[in-house]
Amino acid sequence: MNPIDPTTLSARMEALPGWTLDEEKRAISRSFRFQDFAQAFGFMSQMAIVSEKMDHHPEWFNVYNRVEVRLTTHDANGLTTRDLDWASRADSAFKNATEAA
Ligand code: H2B
């Protein structure tokens, strides 16, 4: 996998307003806050299945209702479309989880 080119990256980031690009542009991150642990863990379970299907796995950290996610493509030593696609799927899962409750 090749790292994403800067122009495509900026365009894709506009569709991911909750995400922050790190200084070296090698990773993106976002903190998700849920109503409670059950909701946070439900999101993680859902995204675990997505991760297996995509063969793309997050670096993430959970405390109670908060899930912090960092995405990078280790094989490319930087960002690829897989990270942006995963982020977009996570935004949808978050929206569904929090809107349904
Ligand atoms: N996830 C992430 N975030 N980056 C990778 O480079 C990566 C991955 N590589 N999941 C995959 C698994 C690779 O190790 C396997 C062998 O396909």
Image (spheres, helix red, strand yellow):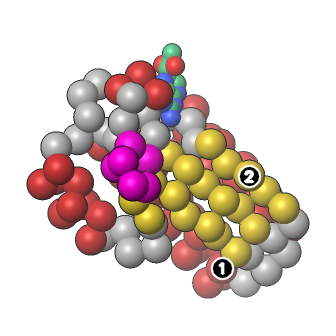
Element under label 2? strand
Single out the mark in the foreground, 1 or 2.
2
Left or right of residue 23: residue 81: left
| Amino acid at circle 2 | Phe
Query: Relative to 44, does residue 55 appear above or below in the rendering?
Result: above
Image mark count: 2
Q: Which residues are magenta?
A: 22-27
Task: Determine if residue 43 is in view.
Answer: no
Res. 61 mark: 2
**What quarter of the picture does the N terminus occupy?**
top left
Residue identifier under label 1: 98
Residue closer to the observer: 91 or 7: 7
Kindly give the residue lying farthest to the left in the view shown: 7
Q: Is mark 1 within 8 Å of ligand 1?
A: no
Element under label 1? helix
Instruction: Give the alpha-carbon distance from disc 1 to disc 2, as whole Å.
Output: 19 Å
